[in-house]
Amino acid sequence: MKEEIHNNTNLKILVVGSGGREHAIVWKLAQSERVREILCAPGNAGIGTIARCVKVAADDVDGLTKLAEQETPDLVVIGPEIPLALGLTDILEDRGFRVFGPNKKCAKLEASKSFTKAFLARHNIPTADYREYTDVDALRKDIGVFGFPMVLKADGLAAGKGVIIAEDRQAAEQAICELMVSRTFGGAGDKVVVEELLRGTEASVLCFVDGSAIIPMESAQDYKRIGDGDTGPNTGGMGNYSPSLLFDEAMELRVAEDILLPTMEGFRKDGLDFRGVLFVGLMLTESGPKVIEFNNRFGDPETQAVLPRLKTDLAEIMLAATEDQLANTQIEWNEELKTVCVVMAAGGYPGDYRKGDPIRGLDGVPDGVTVFHAGTDKNEAGEFVTAGGRVLGVVGRGKTHDEARTHAYEAVSKISFDKASYRSDIGIVYNSEKR
């Protein structure tokens, strides 16, 4: 299987996942002249318009393994973090499949905050000071250990929502109860990491990684909070734009020297055989960039903003990474193109939300816009309906950020579903403190 890949112009690819990130990945792979067929498990209604969706859940490792054995794809691309943490890459590689996505050992960089913090400290990579707690009483005694606001993180996977910023002692008590007593995030809160609050502005860097190289993609700027002006609770991400207006060449160089190269060297020293995408969440502070978090996969909605700017064949890049050939791969970007992604969410998100509401206006989206489906399905009448908290990622393109932003919001104004919500300030830069 692997020996034939170099000259294969008839590739069959299996993408695992069902969100906007996976829609963007499938959309980009479909542009490759080498790709014959794309399957997506489980996919969503939008992905189903360009790929064959198979109803196997992303966390069903046995089901996905059987699917791969039945379909014999030339490449498996794993989108979400849960199957990576469950070791899907290891299982498929043991059966001879080529996989783009890190193995279970590397997946701990996202699956465990304490694992990542120890890695960063061990390799002198800039990050916030921290302490770990498994005992609720010990944590309560240390309330305010780094002052207020107090940053508390569920150690395990919590769908991007396991970070609580407590403004005072009362809020900290409530956060501790939520994480370790009420167990809102289940086993993810068995251990809690408390961090020093970093002050500055967030930025995201996605990197292609293999044993030979770590290659940053174009920068992106994320908006985590639910409300305009970065207010309200954290979400999985309410929007994004690329490139970041705060990420100039000097900052790129500093991130490469202070963070990316030491990270790659740390992988080598620790025996972390990372192949896939490393998402580096950063805080740009007055003293320089510091790592907030690592993720083991394309970010969401960063992917929706970044991939439209990629000129190089994504399939070629992924195949190169599986063979430790990234150092010999030329990756090009459309420097003249700017993108802005606005997430349209179901009313109530990130809390309880409705499903099954018809989505109107998708056929009226103007030129210069691509709509990536995240939480969508089809009803018996064949209509697109809501099926998740984050429903759509509406991506505007333009020669300037303002033009891209105008296109995105023009499209958003034409799309509707019951109690749809979205931020109106995606693409606006805030110089206030963000976390």
Image (cartoon, grey):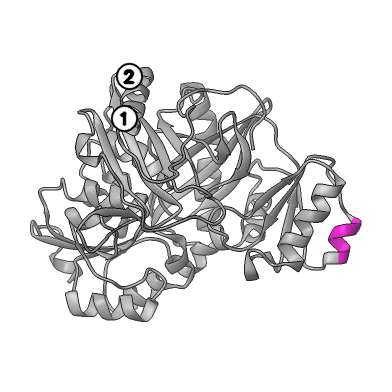
Neighbourhood count class around disc 1 (C-alpha, 10 Å): few under 14, some 14–19, many 20 upward: many
In the rendering, which numbered label is found on residue 396? 1
Does the CB distance between marks 1 and 2 fall below 8 Å? yes
Near-viewer residue (60 or 282):
60
Looking at the picture, which amino acid does disc 1 mark? Gly
Image coords of residue 201 (percent x, y): 60, 30
Please identify the quarter of the rendering in which residue 31 is found. Answer: top left
Rendered view: 367 above or below 157: above
In the rendering, which numbered label is found on residue 403? 2
Residue most toward the right?
A: 141
Does the magenta run of residues contain 328? no
Image coords of residue 224 (percent x, y): 55, 41
The magenta stretch is 137-141
Please identify the quarter of the rendering in which residue 394 is found. Answer: top left
Residue at image position (42%, 71%) is: 59
Residue at image position (38%, 77%) is: 61
Near-viewer residue (304 or 208):
304
Task: Report helix, strand or loop for mark 2.
Answer: helix
Q: Would residue 428 appear left or right of 307 to someone viewing this image?
A: right
Asked if residue 166 shows in the view, the reply is yes
In the rendering, which numbered label is found on residue 165? none
Residue at image position (36%, 28%) is: 409
Rendered view: 271 above or below 228: below
Can you say which quadrant of the picture contains the C terminus?
top right
**What's the distance in space between the residues labelled 1 and 2, CA to CA?**
8 Å
Does the magenta run of residues contain 139? yes
Secondary structure, magenta segment, majority class: helix
Looking at the picture, which amino acid does disc 2 mark? Glu
